[in-house]
Image: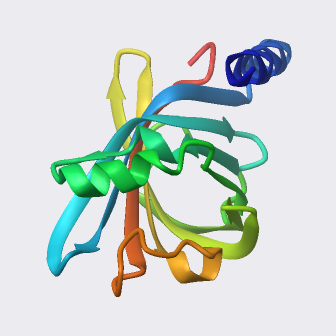
Amino acid sequence: MRLIIMLIWVLWFVVKGTSSAAQVYQTQAGTIQASGRYNGAGVTAVSNHLFMHLNYDKAEMHLRLMIPSFISSNDSLNELIQKMAVQELVFSGKMNITYVQTKSHPSQKFSTQGMLSLNGVSRPLAINSVLVHFPRGRASCILSGDFVVDLAQFNIANLLPGEEKVTVRFNQLVLKKPGE
């Protein structure tokens, strides 16, 4: 059933992306990492399954990630993450830039204000973002962002006992607009 829902979701974005291809970019293979402390030691979990939908003209960002796609080097933490089988991190927000520049530009630092939903709870969140021009093939830029999630605010107990704050970072290639 989950596969069918994801297929419908992906097809909707493909159709939407096709109808407005000049302004929308999406991927299902973005890289995201979460760092925190577990049992008194620093730990990092990584996923290559970040789904990003980026509207260039409106400067809007939408992120989706199934929590169990995170993998760390700590087996007991991985077991806890896998117990969050239906948990999904969802963020939708507006960048405080007019549009996403894909032609040559200096590095741009900006904030993306939006809502983060996790574990059935939604809270306002600001992502610190940087857009660096990096022309290689079809790629135009690298979009990076970072934010801190306080797991206690999202009613997630016992994932990182005593260490509820997690720093999340992502990096994503931004493609050139068609015709550039």
Rendering coords of residue 166 (x, y %): 39, 72
> Foreground residue, 29 or 144?
29
Is residue 106 in view from this perspective? no
> Foreground residue, 134 or 77?
77
In the rendered image, the quadrant that contains the N terminus is top right
Instruction: Left or right? Give the position of 77 relative to 179.
Output: left
Quadrant for residue 97, please give it.
bottom right
- From this view, report whether residue 150 is shown above or below residue 144: below
- From this view, report whether residue 130 is shown above or below residue 150: above
Rendering coords of residue 169 (x, y %): 38, 58
Is residue 80 in view from this perspective? yes
Residue at x-position 78% and y-position 12%: 18
Instruction: Left or right? Give the position of 149 relative to 19.
Output: left
> Foreground residue, 140 or 129?
129
In the image as oriented, which residue stretches furthest toward the bottom? 162
Instruction: Left or right? Give the position of 154 relative to 85.
Output: right
Rendering coords of residue 62 (x, y %): 68, 46
Residue at x-position 71% and y-position 50%: 59
Rendering coords of residue 134 (x, y %): 33, 36
In the rendered image, the quadrant that contains the C terminus is top right
- From this view, report whether residue 44 is shown above or below residue 29: below
Residue at x-position 78% and y-position 47%: 58
